Amino acid sequence: MTWPLFLQMFFMHLIGLVDIFVLSRISDEASAAVGAVNTIMTFVIMMFSFMGQGGSLVYAQCLGAGRRADARRYYSASLVLHVAAGATVSLLLFAFAAAIARLLGLEGVHLEYGTTYLRVVGGGIVLYAVVSMFAGIMSANGHTRQTMTVSVLTNVVNTGLLYVLVLSPSGPQWGVAGAAWSTVTASFVGLAYNVWLVAFRLRVRFAVTLSLRDLVEDGRVLLRYTVPTTLEPMLWQAAQIVTTAIITALGPVALAARIYTLTITNLIGMVSSALSQGLQITVGHLTGAGDAAAVRRAYRAVVWIGLGAAVLLAAAAALLSGPIMRIFTDDPEVVRVGQLLLLMGLVYLPGSAVIMNTAGALRGVGQVRYPALVGILVLWAVFLPLAYTLSLPLGLGVLGVMIAMGVDENLRAVLLVFRWRRLASSPGGTALLDRALVHPSTRQPTAPSEVASQ
């Protein structure tokens, strides 16, 4: 299940990069402005992605227990939640696009470009909100390859429209507005393809008659899973903004090296994130089926695979740090600092892999609050104060930030693994099932036809 999830994340990440690259062919001002407001779009898209993943936890447990009727009810309630949240965020981004662009420090022509892009793309974010809901449904049903094809199609449509609307000499050459409308149109095509996949190709059915009382109750269950799952990455992203501010205070060399190396470390992190999502869905199914032994086996296998992959990729990035940095810049000082940052990846990237997979497994068994609390508290109470103290007052510079990151990642990994082992070591691993949405006493037997379909 993992490699399609990795490619899905990679292609979704690629859309914004392609927009920036195409606009850089027009002017540096357009590219810089869109790059700045894309930090907001990345934040919002990530929020809806994790909201969709939170819903997939609920669906996976119901499907694992053979309770497809319950899963259909949650699909419908989730659709209402995603449309409502997406429409609200779309309206806010459309109405306050100029104000948000000013808060990002954009002025003059940069402000004009940033406002145009944010107003169009942000105003259409409701499309991505619904796409993320469908992605959660398909992933919970084991159809991760289909979610990948949606991302591929969206990228192909976006790239084609960018050429027609922005680059083609015979086209309208709309510039930033063309890039924005190509992104929104591609999202609409992706949504239409999602609807076709779910309704006609995979034949996933929604509950068509839900009382208001059922809708509220099912929505409450979904929020119980999605709010902690969404809140942690939101605050993590906010912490990255603070981290960037600290590194900016260290000077342009440190900032440039940080931006360039993030491209590499984010790709390594995507591998762990994809493994985590695949494990989360698998554990959700096994939890719904009440199979604690299989849950423990799945976690043990994936956490070692993720740790090994992170160590190998971090070591490769460290060994090839010189050639990698020279792809981005010829400045010897930036190359030197970037090499140091990639070398420090060996300190924190393996811990990050353990965090993602252990948190995914904990969420899969219904333990959604603990990973969120650990992530938020350690990040804001340990990492940020330590990063500031080591880098600026103590004069360690960007090395201090990396040391703080190593402390943060490894401390969180230890706390999460400790929690998992405490649950898994209970007699028969029964404590792993205590927070399940569907408890053993209420599970319904799975019909042979449903087992075959699953």
Image: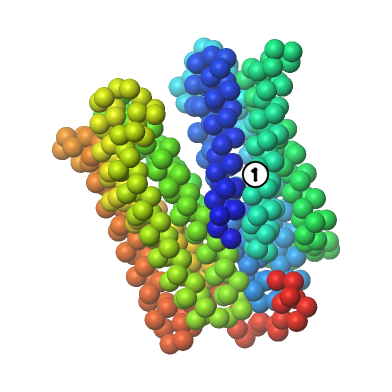
Amino acid identity at mark 1: Ser
Q: Secondary structure at mark 1?
A: helix
Q: Viewed as shown, does residue 10 lie left or right of 220? A: left
Q: Position of residue 186 (x, y in %)?
A: 70, 35
Classify the position of the C terminus by image quarter. bottom right
Q: Quadrant of the N terminus?
A: bottom right
Say above or below: 201 vs 386: below
- Horizontal side of residue 200 vs 279, given as left or right: right
Where does residue 119 sit, x and y in percent of width and height?
64, 27
How many numbered marks are there?
1
Q: Residue at x 55, y 26 (%)?
A: 20
Of 209 and 392, nearer the camera is: 392
Question: Which quadrant holds residue 173?
Answer: top right
Using the rendered view, name the quadrant where residue 301 is placed: bottom left
Name the residue carrying label 1. Answer: 151
Estimate the x, y position of residue 176 in percent, counting from the top left.
Answer: 62, 20
Q: From the viewer's perspective, is 40 left or right of 200?
A: left
Towards the viewer: 314 or 192:
314
Q: Residue at x 54, y 64 (%)?
A: 280
| Residue furthest to the left | 394
